[in-house]
Amino acid sequence: MKFGTPFTPSSVKLMLLGSGELGKEVVIEAIRLGCEVVACDRYENAPAMQVAHRSYVFNMRDGKLIRKVVQKEKPDFIVPEIEAIATDELVKLEKEGWRVIPTARAVRLTMDRQGIRQLAAETLKLPTSPYRFAGSLEELKAGAAAVGFPCFIKPTMSSSGHGQSMAKKPQDLAKAWKFAMEGARGKTNKVIVEGKIDFNYEITLLTVRHKGGISYCAPVGHIQTDGDYRESWQPQPMTKTALKKAQDIARKVVGNLCGKNGRGIFGVELFVKDDNVWFSELSPRPHDTGMVTMVSQTMSEMELHVRAILDLPIPLLRQGFEGQACIEFRPGASVAIIAHGNMKNPQYEGVAEALKIKGTHIRIFGKPEVIGHRRMAVALATGKTVAEARKKAAQAAKKVRVVNA
């Protein structure tokens, strides 16, 4: 590939569908390589729009509007950054010759929990939690009885924990169904009900499909609250057997979704206990838990994503983690900074105090408002050990306060 210059006929153009904090970093990495970037989202002044060359505001569930912008901008790559997109239109565009990252099929399947779970468990025969799908409260009751209590109810289309809840007893199911329908991003009117797995910890295995094959980052451990990321660290200690199983699972599902020509990074979420590993979910894009890689790796997950898209080399360096070759890293941690309430003019206090802690960084996303609660920034830290990095990131996060000006 030849690299051109923005605003000229030679430019290499990326069009982001979704312009959140992860997309913002993708834009920065693409611009560093001379790409021209167009950022799209449902609201004005989204984080990635603040650093892109141009932006558009429209409902990305409307396939006609996506097509209109694609035909106007003629991007070399269409790069989805969120789940709530008219994926059927992306499939059509890809068939017409437009390049969708990683593939339109990957974006369509992973947007729908039913699609990705059936691919993983039924087609690829990967280990998962017990599950059922339900399209009504009665079906939910039957599914919960089949997988047992406690169980987890999630809309088949949602993100960042929206609509997810746990039912400890049958009496909780009506409330869980209502909550799921209110939090769903799509119109499937379906939920997945999952049985509880006895696991020790969760990881995200950032898996890169690039021109040279498939590569892995060191596993990222994380903590979620109500299905939404709160803290992550790298590396998560694992047994050699568990790490190999995790990589095998990631290779199978990413390989299936990408085929021969798919490119990009995937956040493969897994449950682990001792030497046992279960597939949970997958995102065909940079993962929120992977924000730690902005300080823990020589190449962040966003840089890896852009490199893969542009068919650039991704070197592997052996760093001694369980004897595995992976992207070079050092112990690091991240803690999300959450704002609560309703704010039309968010301001940040305590940033200077947070940065007095050695080896810490603060990334403010630039989101224009808060309604209820919202992830607005992240504290990052490195240390000699993961424990030290986690402690420093937590201390830094506590120093930062989001207030309404």
Image (tube, grey):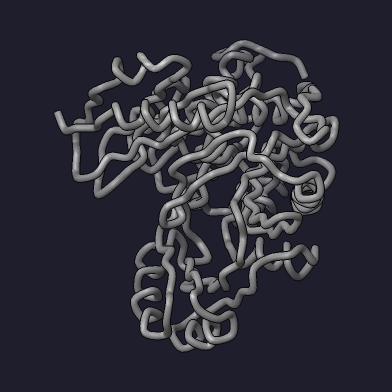
Q: Position of residue 171 (x, y in %)?
A: 36, 84
At 19% from the left and 32% from the top, the residue drawn is: 403
How many marks do you count on the picture? 0
- Give residue 103's quadrant in the image: top right
Residue 317 vs residue 404, the one in the foreground = 317
Q: Is residue 289 visible?
A: yes
Q: Quadrant of the N terminus?
A: top right
Q: Is residue 73 visible?
A: no
Residue 281 locus on image (x, y percent)? 62, 56
Q: Position of residue 97 (x, y in %)?
A: 72, 41
At x 52%, y 50%, the residue is 83
Q: Is residue 241 above or below residue 3?
A: below
Rendered location of residue 364, percent (x, y): 37, 26
Who is closer to the viewer here, 2 or 201?
Answer: 201
Position of 325 relative to 171 (above/below): above
Q: Quadrant of the C terminus?
A: top left
Corner quadrant of residue 178: bottom left
* Rendered view: 250 above or below 328: below
Left or right of 88: which side holds 375? left
Question: Residue at (29%, 27%) from the top-left corner?
Answer: 399
